Image (cartoon, grey):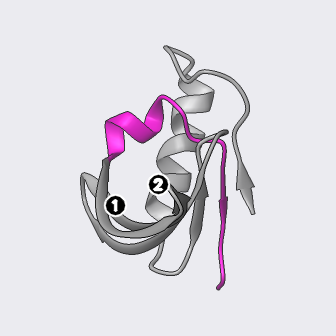
Amino acid sequence: CWEIRGYMGDNPAINQKFEEMWNSIRIGDIVNDYNHSVLVIGKTPDRITVVEGNRGGKVHWGRQILKESLRKGLASIETVY
């Protein structure tokens, strides 16, 4: 499990850790943004595609989260590998 605490901002050490975490994300991993956990079902260099549940009592497939958006709120990644 990778974990980041605190806002990325201009902190080079935290930004480097984010890049390491981003590069480690694989299909099947669980990404948490402090408020919500999602399951990764796809990844490109600039975004992940996810499936998420309990959103209005339904399961939602295919939402895309931009890397830069995730940089602002990534809390942890749980890997299945």
Q: Residue 2 at what x, y percent from top left?
A: 71, 56
**SS of the residue at dot 2?**
helix
Q: Residue furthest top?
A: 10
Any magenta on residue 74?
yes
Camera-nearest residue between 69 and 53: 53
Residue at point 56% right, 73% down?
A: 29
Q: CA distance from mark 2 to mark 1?
A: 10 Å
Mark 1, other Cα within 10 Å: few <14 / some 14–19 / many ≥20: many
Query: Does 37 sit left or right of 45 as displayed?
Result: right
- Indicate the position of residue 42 as horizontal and vertical percent values: 32, 74
Name the residue tied to disc 1: 48
Vertical position of residue 65 compared to residue 45: above or below: above
Q: Quadrant of the N terminus?
A: bottom right
Residue depth check, mark 2 versus mark 1: number of the one nearer the observer: 1
Indicate the secondary structure of the residue bearing disc 1.
strand
**Region rendered in magenta:** 66-81
Look at the image and say whether residue 18 sits in the magenta stretch.
no
Going by the image, does 9 lie left or right of 62? right
Question: Within 10 angstroms of label 2, few (less than 14), some, or many (20 or more) residues?
Answer: many
Left or right: residue 4 compared with residue 52: right
Which residue is drawn at the image coordinates 64% and 85% (left, top)? 81
Say what amino acid the circle numbered 1 marks: Ile
Q: Which residue is mark 2?
A: 22
